[in-house]
Image: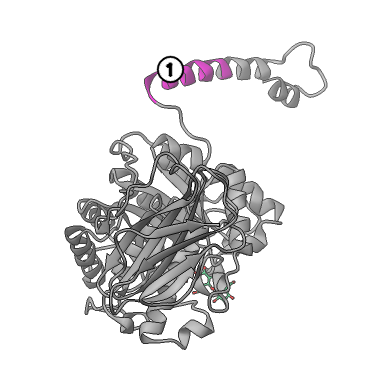
Amino acid sequence: MEKMLARGSGSSAARPRPRAVLMSVVAGVAVVAATVAVASRASAGTTLGSAATEKGRYFGAAVAANKLSDGTYVGILNREFNMVTPENEMKWDATEPSQNQFNYTNADRIVTHAQTNGMRVRGHALAWHSQQPGWAQNLSGTALRSAMVNHVTQVATHYKGKIYAWDVVNEAFADGGTGARRDSNLQRTGNDWIEVAFRTARAADPGAKLCYNDYNTDGQNAKSNAVYAMVQDFKARGVPIDCVGFQSHFNSASPVPSDYQANLQRFANLGVDVQITELDIEGSGSAQADNYGRVVRACLAVSRCTGITVWGIRDSDSWRASGTPLLFDGSGNKKPAYTAALDALNAGGGTPPPTTTPPTTTPPTTTPPTTTPPTTPPPGGGCTASLTLNQWQGGFTTNVRVTVGANPVNGWAVTLTLPGGATITNTWSAQPSGTAGTVTFRNVSYNGQLSAGATAEFGFQGVGTGPSGTATCSAS
Ligand code: G2I
């Protein structure tokens, strides 16, 4: 108020001029009105993130690691958004440029930025036909299937506990009216590649919501019907899936569908969360603003629509920059579309915010641990090993927990026998003696020295039937 008076009263501040007095009175009325409003309903959010939070949702943006040094960009990101999706940095070509050589540098920068600034992270994307590294593009059959399982396991394990939701599989259905799967090297490994990816992701990070994500599925059509049937089937058979992402890239050729909300709702009715994951709407002015308002209202009207992510921050950051599809202009100014989105978030009504049910932490198809992990260290030194098996048609992942007894150890070895026909394709955090039959897994350099009662975990995956039952553990 003092600033307003100073600006409005020119050189004479001692005695307010009539206009300044009027402003004081108007401001006083505004304060009273605001107080009444606060008393009757939740206060309006002043940013996209805070307004969405008041509706029990998040508002996110796709973020590029190389823009985190741009002050304007980071200023808007930190002020407005409370969820981030790495735009390219978690994709297969970025995280595993050579087979089994992982590079998390740029993705880690985004995750660290998010954590430091109180934002959550949507992981994007574990298995996708596009943006594969060259070595994966050249694989097929069992080799590609194993590489995919390894990739999902390694990346989801690296980010375990840090990801709100993973786009486990992206864009696996074809466009057009067939409702068929998209042809790709992954699809040619067998129709079950999607459920294998989901089961593998669940085994690696049981706390992350697992999503299927696609475009041109925003309204009811042959493609979204096919995704719907897949989700329905996964739910019926206990394949772990928690959410469906609707990319929502809109333009004049692909406008916001009239049945957008109804389509979100029918998926939600299958028992999954729905999310708007890559929103951008080409255009400008009030037409663009109206469309953004419609999208936000559709999400708010569906109680299991847990949040909205826009695919970039400023128009100049967009993959479709020429279509000026985002909420901030190239200089970082708020566009009418921003105001429409914020106003829609702040408007009354809508259904109650979604319940924040955590994903089921036990994969429905996971065999429970064959030995109960000891709650107290085994007496008299040594170690014990417990196995958790995640089995699917044709393949498995086994996680092993080593627990040290009453004396510290310098190393450990776990021996188990694989059923006939089973072959290990990949091991992490241990060194195996072989790939079939009776195999001994020894500690690697960083997890051999353990204090009394401490635990270490390692795992392996393979084709065929995985081992269950007990494993012997010996300490040195
Ligand atoms: O295509 C829009 C999106 C559709 N849904 C899945 C998203 O992952 C996808 O994102 C876009 C990124 O926004 C682009 O930034 O995916 C494109 C690739 O499919 C990304 O473009 C690529 C360029 O094609 C590359 O030349 C470039 O090296 O971005 C790379 C990194 O800047």
**Mark 1, residue position:** 36
- Segment colored magenta: 27-41
Magenta highlight on residue 381: no
Q: Amino acid at mark 1?
A: Val
Query: Where residue 196 sits: x, y (%)?
Result: 32, 69
User: In the rendered image, which quarter is residue 393 located in?
Assistant: bottom left
Which of the 4 image quadrants contains residue 227? bottom left
Q: Nearer the viewer, residue 19 or 157?
A: 157
What x and y, as percent, mark residue 364? 24, 55
Residue depicted at x 56% and y 66%:
89
- Per the image, is 34 magenta? yes
339 versus 231 height, above or below:
above
Asked if residue 185 is positioned above or below residue 217 in the image, the reply reads: below
Q: Position of residue 255 (x, y in %)?
A: 35, 65
- Packing grade of label 1 (10 A; few <14, some 14-19, many >=20) is few
Residue 331 x, y percent position in the rendering: 66, 55
Q: Nearer the viewer, residue 366 or 451?
A: 451
> Magenta stretch mostly in which secondary structure?
helix
What colouring method underlies this structural image? one colour
Q: Residue at x 29, y 62 (%)?
A: 468
Nearer the observer, 347 or 451: 451
Residue 266 is left or right of residue 409, and the answer is left
Q: Nearer the viewer, residue 354 or 386?
A: 386
> Considering the numbered disc 1 on the image, is that residue within a helix, a strand or a loop?
helix
Point out the image quarter for the N terminus: top right
Residue farthest toward the right in the current orientation of the protein:
11
